[in-house]
Image (cartoon, rainbow, N blue to C red):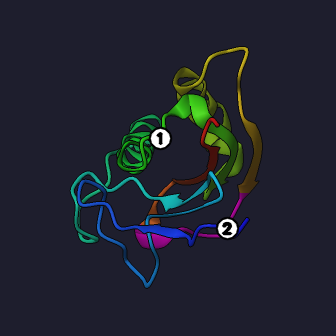
Amino acid sequence: MVPSPPIFYQVANAPAPVAPYSHAVEQGGWLFVTGQMPFIGKTPDSPYPEGIGAQTHQVFSNLKDVLDAAGLAFADVVMARVYLSHFERDYDGMNGVYKTYFASDRYPARTCVGVTGLARGALVEIDLVARRST
């Protein structure tokens, strides 16, 4: 069986990429979603909302736009990576929002790390891996 070629998603509803990347790439039923920033609008110069809670909600809104374009949902997510620019201060606030996007008995595997900085001073960035049901 010859594997199908990858599908590269450029999503009109998601914020425009700020560098040379696709919003997501799908191969063999796996969807790899590029880390999303908390842009309120669809351009890289759009503002961020204030605070970790609002920024985390906005990141999930942007992630949803990408998942929707691929025909997937948060229930299909198997792995998440979270990057926080102020880990100690924002970890609990991010988690308070994060857990509302997944069923409590189906949280994806996750890595969460503190970083020295994110683009344009964002507080949070999240990328995902999802799997299409067969």
Q: Callout 1: few (<14), some (14-19), or many (20+) C-alpha neighbours within 10 Å?
A: many
Question: Which quarter of the rendered picture does the C terminus lie within?
Answer: top right
Residue 64: image x %, image y %?
Answer: 40, 41
- The quadrant holding residue 106 is top right
Residue at x 73%, y 14% (from the top left corner): 105
- What's drawn in magenta, residue-wise? 114-120
Answer with left or right where residue 9 lies relative to residue 81: left
Q: Residue furthest front?
A: 1
Question: Which quarter of the rendered picture does the N terminus lie within?
Answer: bottom right
- The quadrant holding residue 92 is top right
Confirm whether residue 93 shows in the render. Answer: no
Residue 101: image x %, image y %?
Answer: 52, 26
Q: Which mark is residue 68?
A: none
Residue 20: image x %, image y %?
Answer: 44, 85
Q: Of callouts 1 and 2, which one flags the residue occurring earlier in the amino acid sequence? A: 2
Q: Secondary structure at mark 2?
A: loop
Q: Is residue 119 magenta?
A: yes
Decide which of 5, 12 is in the foreground and name it. 5
Q: Which mark is residue 56?
A: 1
Q: Amino acid at mark 2?
A: Pro
Rendered position, 16 above or below 72: below
Residue at x 46%, y 78% (from the top left corner): 21
What's the CA distance linking mark 1 and mark 2? 36 Å
Q: Which mark is residue 3?
A: 2
Residue 53: image x %, image y %?
Answer: 46, 34
